[in-house]
Image (spheres, grey):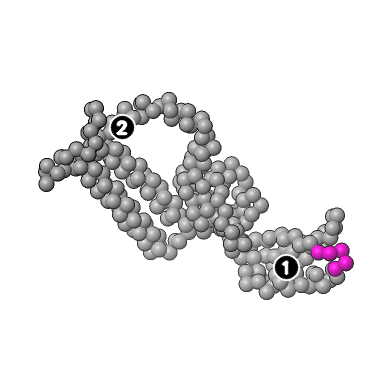
């Protein structure tokens, strides 16, 4: 068995990889995978016990996952016989060139880390970005997955959440008013249009029915006639 583990797989110059080194690297990889799964389950269970399913545990899990995988990657390289210090020093110039060419990518990475640490935007939050009202499904290092009200999945670079003005409807504890513009033909009956729009808003399950939050219609004349539907709704 010892002879098998010491058998050489790759041998070039001063570098030699043995079967034992490769086996340890595989064990580290598999162990890291299951360790992250266990830690993620423990974090999720802890938040559920506290009745605080606010999406922050997803951010914590992501940060822990990235940190552990980074350490595991370093250990795997060292196990396989690579000199980490030498690799970093010898590739410094290359990394600078790559960094200059991928500035936007690195900007998204930094923005992703900032989002995960600050927690200003979390998974399951309803936010408005680029004129779209979306639900955050996943926050990764470079991009975030969101779903529109039409159930379309959109991939958004993380720097947009950091550099631009974002409305987080989930953080607003008060009822919120949405303005929806509806275009109709010039010959349409204004009173009938107003009645239909109010009925549609009232029938929606998330629209408040209280008198102070009643849906209203406002006529707006530009090149065409637009009817803006304003409805007060609970957080979607």
Where in the figure is residue 111, as x and y percent of width and height? 51, 42
- Towards the viewer: 224 or 215: 224
| Residue marked by disc 1 | 215
Disc nearest the viewer among 1 and 2: 2
Quadrant hosting residue 10? top left
What residue span does the magenta drawing correspond to? 184-188
Horizontally, residue 147 falls left or right of residue 39, namely right
Where in the figure is residue 153, as x and y percent of width and height? 56, 57
| Residue marked by disc 2 | 84
Horizontally, residue 13 falls left or right of residue 186, namely left
The secondary element bearing badge 2 is classed as helix
Q: Residues within 10 Å of mark 2 (few under 14, many from 20)?
A: few
Asked if residue 187 is among those painted magenta in the image, a careful observer would answer yes
Residue placed at 85% from the left, 54% from the top? 223
- Towards the viewer: 27 or 149: 27
Can residue 96 be seen at all in this image of the molecule? yes
Which residue appears farthest toward the right when viewing the image? 187
Where in the figure is residue 75, as x and y percent of width and height? 28, 40
The secondary element bearing badge 1 is classed as loop
Residue placed at 75% from the left, 69% from the top? 197
Where in the figure is residue 65, as x and y percent of width and height? 37, 49
Asked if residue 219 is among those painted magenta in the image, a careful observer would answer no
Can residue 212 be seen at all in this image of the molecule? no
Residue placed at 76% from the left, 66% from the top? 216
First along the sequence among labels 1 and 2 = 2
Horizontally, residue 94 falls left or right of residue 196, namely left
């Amino acid at each position: 068995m010892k002879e098998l583990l010491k058998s050489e797989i790759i041998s070039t110059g001063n570098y030699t990889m043995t079967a034992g080194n490769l086996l340890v690297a595989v064990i580290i990889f598999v162990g890291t995978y299951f360790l992250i799964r266990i830690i993620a389950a423990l974090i999720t269970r802890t938040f559920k016990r506290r009745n605080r399913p606010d999406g922050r545990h997803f951010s914590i899990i992501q940060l822990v996952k990235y940190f552990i995988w980074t350490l595991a990657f370093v250990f795997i390289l060292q196990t396989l016989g690579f000199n980490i210090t030498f690799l970093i020093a010898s590739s410094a110039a290359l990394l600078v060139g790559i960094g200059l060419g991928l500035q936007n990518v690195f900007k998204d990475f930094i923005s992703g880390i900032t989002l995960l640490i600050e927690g200003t935007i979390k998974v399951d939050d309803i936010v408005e970005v680029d004129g779209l009202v979306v639900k955050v499904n996943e926050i990764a290092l470079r991009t975030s997955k969101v779903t529109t009200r039409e159930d379309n999945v959109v991939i958004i670079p993380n720097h947009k959440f950091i550099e631009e003005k974002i409305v987080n409807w989930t953080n607003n504890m008060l009822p919120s008013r949405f303005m929806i513009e509806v275009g109709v033909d010039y010959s349409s009956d204004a009173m009938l249009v107003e009645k239909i729009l109010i009925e549609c808003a009232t029938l929606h399950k998330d629209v408040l029915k209280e008198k102070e939050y009643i849906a209203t219609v406002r006529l707006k004349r530009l090149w065409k006639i637009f009817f803006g539907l304003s409805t007060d709704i609970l957080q979607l």
